[in-house]
Image (cartoon, grey):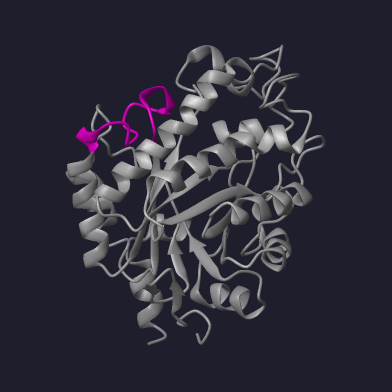
Amino acid sequence: MKHLLTPLELKGRRIKNRLLLAPSGTATGSPEGLVTGKTLDWFRQRSKGFGITVTEHTAVDTLGQYHPNMLTAASDHCIPGLQRLSSLLRENGCVSLLQLDHDGGWNLEQLRGCLDPLKNPEMTSPADTLSDSALARIAEDFGSAAARVQKAGFDGVQIKGSHVFLIHMLFSPLTNHRSSGPYAGGSFQGRSRLFLEVLQSIRARVSASFLISARIAAEDFCPGGSTVEDAIQLAKLLEQNGADLIDLSGGVKYYYTNPYSNKPGYFGAAAARIRAAVSVPVVLTGGVHTPEQAERLLQEETADIIGVCRAARENEYWAQQALSSHG
C-alpha cells in the first residue's frame, strides 16, 4: 500500500493518505437544513481513517434544496451545527471539505424529470428557466455560503458541478438550451460561465489557504452531451481560476455511474487524461471497494486521490478496516 499511504501536502495541510470519503446524501438534516445529531453520528465512525472527508451536498439557498432534510449553508443560523461537524472531522484526523450545491429547482414539481420526454415533452430544464440575473445571484450565494463554511471551521469546500444539478445543467448541451445571453448553451464559454462565476465568487470571499475542490462530470456518456474534451478544457479553466482539486464524477443522465463500465475507478480513462492536463491533484471516485483497487489506480497514475462512496456507505468502518489490514 505504498501509494495509498503516501501523505500529500496541499496549501500547508498534510493529508495523511490518498483516501477520500466521497460525498453521499444522508438526509439527516433538520427541516430547516441544520446539522443534527444524526448527521454527526453518520460521520462519527465513517470518516475515521480517511485523509479527506467531503460532506454531503449542502444547498446555498432554500430554492437549491433537493429535499427537505438536505443541509444548507444559506444563513448564519447554519454555522453552529456546521462547527460541530467540522470539529468532529478534525478530531478524526481528516481534512474537511463541505460540498456546496444548488439543485436548480428540482424541488419544484414542474421541473422534475427533465430528461424524460414523457414527463417533459418540451425538454425544459431549470437551466432554461432561470434568468441571467438569477444565475448571477446564485453564483454570489455560493460565495456567501463558502464564507460561512470557512467560519464554521472547515478546511475548504467542494463545488458540485456534476450530475443533474444546476451547475452541470448549464454546462451540458443536453440541458442548456439557452440561445442567447452570457450563459447561452451554444459555446463552451457560455456553458462554463456559471461554474467559473461560482469559483470566482468563492475565491473572493475566503482566505487564500482555504481549499476549493471542483467536482466535474467526466462526460455525459450520451450523444450530444458533454465530452471528455469538454471536461479537460473545464478542468484547465478551473485550475487557472483557483481550484485546488479536480474531482471526477458523472453527468446529467447517468449521475455517478458510467454506463459502459463498472470496473473499479470507472471514470479512470477521463481522470488520467485530465491529470495529464492539470497540475492540481485529481480525485477519482467510482466502483472502488477495496484498498487493493485504490492502490492499483494510484500506482497506474490514473489519479492522485481515490474516493470511496458506496463501500463506506455500507460499512462505516471501511477505512479503519482497510488501513488496519495493511498496517
On screen, 215 above or below 109? below
- Residue 254 placement: quadrant: top right
Q: Is residue 303 visible?
A: yes
Q: Is residue 253 visible?
A: no
**Residue at 57% of width from left, 16% of height from top?**
131
Front residue of this view, candidates 171 and 324:
171
x and y percentages locating residue 17 in the rendered image: 43, 76
**Residue at 60% of width from left, 48% of height from top?**
216
x and y percentages locating residue 41 in the rendered image: 22, 52
Drawn side of residue 297 relative to residue 86, left or right: right
x and y percentages locating residue 16 in the rendered image: 38, 76
- Residue 324 placement: quadrant: bottom left
**Residue at 62% of width from left, 80% of height from top?**
299
On screen, 145 above or below 279? above
On screen, 185 above or below 251? above
Image quarter of the C terminus: bottom left
Residue 115 shown in magenta: no
x and y percentages locating residue 74 in the rendered image: 32, 31
**Residue at 56% of width from left, 67% of height from top?**
281
Looking at the rendered structure, the number of numbered marks drawn on it comes to 0
Front residue of this view, candidates 131 and 258:
131
Predominant SS of the magenta segment: loop
Front residue of this view, candidates 259 and 14:
14
Magenta span of residues? 59-78
Taking the view exactly as shown, the residue that stands out farthest to the right is 223
